[in-house]
Image (tube, rainbow, N blue to C red):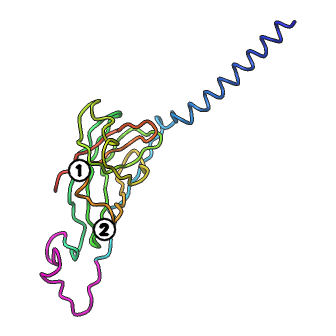
Amino acid sequence: MVDVKRRGRVWAGAVVAAVVVLGIGSYWFQPWKLWRDETVSEALPTAAAPQRPAGSSGGSDSPGGSGSPGGSGSSGPRTLARGTLISHEHATTGTAKLIRLADGSHTLRLEGLDTSNGPDLRVWLTDAPVKEGVAGWRVFDDGKYVSLGKLKGNKGDQNYEIPADVNLADYSSVTIWCDRFDVSFGAAALTPA
């Protein structure tokens, strides 16, 4: 009789331990995301052109002038750099673009993004070189990087505002970074447009 009670307690303890391990594993890996796509379809943001003081011509003394493409007085967005996403930990395709809006603010735009969903995915600007294959999976947190926020969706077109204090000259690549496992899902080297 004592042996039966002891076995019952062992089984109960094993079941409780299995439930705890399963719960922690589910939270950590979030396996349901492997079967659930999140599609985002954002239009390129528009920003009003800056207002010039009355009587100002916006002529040659302003950088870029109002007539030059991409100058602060230009009428629309200008692509400064672009790159094609390559696969790392997960198959990833699409295009990354650094865009200056008419008001002088900057946006990172992901177009035609197609990658796997996963836990704690972020969009980072980095100074790391983009390397093909396994050699490129973990390099992006070795140097300088800035997080632009959580990945909005694993598919589609989406925009990420770049903070005004970020010096774009310091960054040469973008990665879809899994912060939970410190690995790149995919990345793109940014080259001047």
Dot 2 corresponds to which residue?
105
Residue sitting farthest toward the left:
60
Image position of 160 with respect to 26: above or below: below
Q: Residue at x 31, y 57 (%)?
A: 108
> Split into 4 quadrants, where in the image is the C terminus?
bottom left
Which label belongs to residue 135? none
Residue sitting farthest toward the bottom:
55
Give the amino acid type for the residue marked by disc 2 in the picture. Answer: Ser
First in residue order: circle 1 vs circle 2: 2
Image position of 27 with respect to 52: above or below: above
Q: Residues within 10 Å of mark 2 (few under 14, many from 20)?
A: some
> Split into 4 quadrants, where in the image is the N terminus?
top right
Dot 1 corresponds to which residue?
172
Q: In the image, residue 128 lies at what x, y percent?
A: 26, 44
Q: In the image, residue 186 lies at what x, y percent?
A: 31, 40
Q: Residues within 10 Å of mark 1 (few under 14, many from 20)?
A: many
